[in-house]
Amino acid sequence: MTWKQQLADSMPAELAAEIETFESQIALRSQGKIDEKVFAETRLRRGVYGQRYDNGRRNDGTGTRPLAYPADRMTKGPETVWDAPGMVRIKIPFGGLNPDQMDTLADLAEEYSDEVCHITTRQDVQLHFVHIDDTPDLMRRLAAVGITTREACGNTVRNVTACPLAGVCRDETFDVTPHAHACMRFLLGHPDSQDFGRKFKVAFSGCGEHACGLVSMHDLGLVAATRTVDGQLRRGFVTYVGGGLGAVPHQAKLLDEFLPEEELLPLAQAIARVFARLGEKKNRARARIKFLVAQLGLDEFKRLVLEERAKLADDPRWRAHLAAAATYGEQPLKPAAALNGGAVPAGCADWMRTNVYRQRQAGYAVATVTLPLGDLSARQMRELAAIARRYVGDTVRTTVEQNIVLRWVSEADLPDLYRDLAAAGLGESGAGTLSDVTACPGTDTCKLGIASSRGLAAELRARSSTPDGRPHDAVAGLRIKTSGCFNSCGQHHVADLGFYGVSRTVDGYTVPHFQVVLGGQWTANAGAYGLAIGAVPSKRIPEAVQRITEKFVAERQPDETFQAFTRRVGKRALKEMLTDLMQVPSHAERPEFYSDWGDPREFTLGDMGVGECAGEVVSLTEFDLAAAEAQVFEAQLELEDGRPEEADRLAYDGMLLAARGLIKTELVDISDDPDRIVAEFRARFFDTKLFFDKYAGGKFAMYLFRRHEAAPRQQTPERARQLVEEAQLFLEASHACQARLAAGETGAAAQQVPAR
Amino acid sequence: MSPSVDNLQRCGLKVFFAPGAEPDVRAFIPIFHRWIQTSAVDGLLIDVADYTHLTDGPAVLLAGHEGNYAIDRTEGRPGLYYYRKQPAAGALVDRLALIGRTLLAAAVRLESDAASEGCRFRGNEVQFVANDRLLAPPAPATVAALRPDLTAFLRTLFRDDAEDVPEPTEMRDRIRLSLRSRRGASLSELLERL
Ligand code: SF4
């Protein structure tokens, strides 16, 4: 008996057939009959990712050593060894789960993974350390409970997210759940969403004021709205497009003030068609829809979308969900009942203060299960499923803050529920507070991770949970989010205190650091992004957090928010406050600075690999180009804030980073010494004309050479502005050069320069 | 023996810390990293995962190719757990012996490497975990089918000091059975017997 036979009658036929095809593709690849790149994209579209060290190498702290997998010649993608364990991302549309699905997730975590379920910042579930040969059965078992991993990764429409309070929120305009569900079903596998240059993320929110949907940072964001038309109340959406985090965060732009609900799916389809047709395909660093919107301008983009919409043939699926949506609602398992004022177990009052939300339906509440770093053991997942069956039934959701909520808890049950959660080790209070730190996988498992975002998050959590570390009331509600690199999977841009991993070289050692980003706005659907203040060694981040929060407590004005405070105090003063923490003691004096949180190995960037985070492979060059972009963006901000010296420095750094990225195509071990970078760049890309633009020749390279040879003695805003613009052009030329290299147009010339 | 249970490959064994001899779980992180550097225990060792923030399940995981090692706190009973992920040759009883040898060798090594932390294991109980719901669904019939091989393994391990294979106390998730002896023995002795 196999799982395929066992579950033949429980899987939807379409999913069963798809999994069957995937299993055949695995077999064909294992026989070398499918190209590795094609197979990589195929498995990514099934949610089957690579994981750190899957190139068959790992730095064990003493040096990089091979990991001798049995099938070490067989690959499942470029530089990805077949036998190396990987990650499976499981799409949970709008975060909705039922107890049977939770049981299955627990079973799969035990049998194929490492006995841990991880909730992501986009309401997905991830399992790590999974062998590729196990993925078809894993998918079958998910399909049998109505879950698919299809299009959880790759250049596709990713999980459709929504407020976890949808339907029970006191402030929402209407419940967006049925629309989010319909949107997911409609776009999943839709022919018009199969040819994107990059991923496409959709989010729904029930209102514009609160944070839950994070609409402003999505490719397509929809906020519930109503309008009276001909005396009738109509439902629709305020529609945003082109938001995104990443190296350079973009706020989504308002596309439509009121999109009637019946136009939701056709408009999404029209946007998908425009994106597929006109979006960048070769240069993935420029391929998100935000770049297309910026390039075309919002008006032109909108015109094209409406033109496309007008051409679409009518599809009955556009309206199929509307009748049910009008009457949609969840059935509570238990009758409503108020808390009777009786005694509650120890710890319950604290938990109720931070983890319980009173629903708009009287007598019911939403209970948040706080998950440290988004993790729960398989056994805890199963316990939670049993608890859900006992108290709420099928009304469980994951959240973008990496927690799980139980909705429709009869209020009278709250003390018993708390007791049961606490018995399962799931009764931690502090949801949505300073201790509830969000973190991306970072160096734990992500191939692109620079620093340990989870290690840092765990440390910050642990400190704020001790009696001494208990935060002051004024800062208890602040949010901390950490990412392992600037790609922002931990959503650091929208945190009060955000951190992303970077590195610095000190005396020949590489030292883990985090860039400090302050004052992002979680509310108003991620309404504003934070200010980057500077890089602080990882081991001093807890001190930095303490200093920043103490300053806020001491100096805030009445009713001043943390965002308002950071803007009033300003970047310069905030940076000055941290300047001493930015210093790195010598290796002899403080060796612990040279390893990361939770990892005693001496820190190295040697384990960074070719990432699959965003679909196709991400090279080290693309990585550096993205970092350069972030620097130039920062330079622009400095300029706007009237700090030309800083702007000049950042713009120059940005050019150096981009140049270094290009050099890495030939010389991976290039140092970050500016003289070396410029010399190598000149020899490899200028003298060989590899960097030359068809029309402008070597002009853009001269911008770097000039600035490197002579830093301005006296900085003026005009000079700095010019350099920022030059840096932007240099960056564009670097992207173009990288795209040419990737296409192999200049490959032969590239090999003429010997590696040094 | 039901043919499906005979094919069981995904299974594991766990030994428990002696009372009061459970070090702070964080102490195992550098030890496991050192094990990777020196290939100190069996199998291809890949990476260490820090789950010390969890109160249940793995606290520190040493991920391997053939199987994973974990300092595990399931049911509030901390110990060292080793479970196979890749198939091994031989009959089930041979595979149990292989898993037992791998686990006990690692546990002996851990007692020595974490001696300064006071790490010690109990030598009178080994927990068996069947980690495959297709071949070993949690049901009385599965336990009955497993019993002969488990008994043989138990007798090899604890000799005439072995207790009978018990009835499972609960089977909601997967089959977990505690194989016990009356007096117990040191881990090194148990290892020699396998
Ligand atoms: S790409 Fe960067 S931000 Fe995203 S998961 Fe990896 S380390 Fe975290």
Image (spheres, coloured by chain):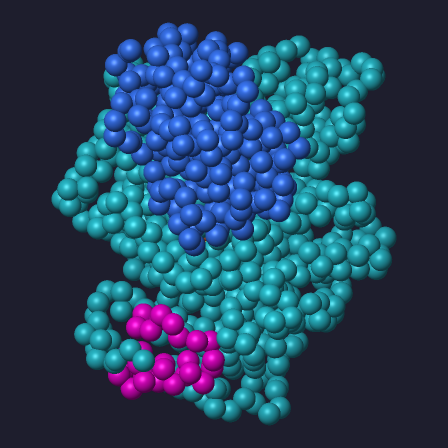
Which x, y percent locates residue A174? 59, 29
Q: Residue A642: in sight, yes or no?
A: yes
In front here: A322 or A732? Answer: A732
In front here: A22 or A711? Answer: A22
Residue drawn where x is 74% and y is 68% of the image: A577
Residue drawn where x is 50% and y is 79% of the image: A652
Quadrant location, the C terminus of chain A: bottom left
Magenta range? A664-691
Which x, y percent locates residue A163? 57, 34
Which x, y percent locates residue B191? 42, 32
Residue drawn where x is 61% and y is 77% of the image: A646
Query: As displayed, is residue A446 above or below residue A680?
Result: above
Q: The chain drawn blue is chain what? A: B
Q: Does the magenta-highlighted stretch encompass residue A223?
A: no
Position of residue A226 in the picture relative to residue A180 (left or right): right
Which x, y percent locates residue A154? 34, 46
In front here: B113 or A516? Answer: B113
Query: As displayed, is residue A479 above or below residue A427?
Result: below
Q: Residue A242: in sight, yes or no?
A: no
Q: Does the magenta-highlighted stretch encompass residue A679?
A: yes
Which colour denotes chain A?
A: cyan
Position of residue A327 in the picture relative to residue A547 (left or right): left
In front here: A558 or A104? Answer: A104
Query: As displayed, is residue A536 above or below residue A714?
Result: above
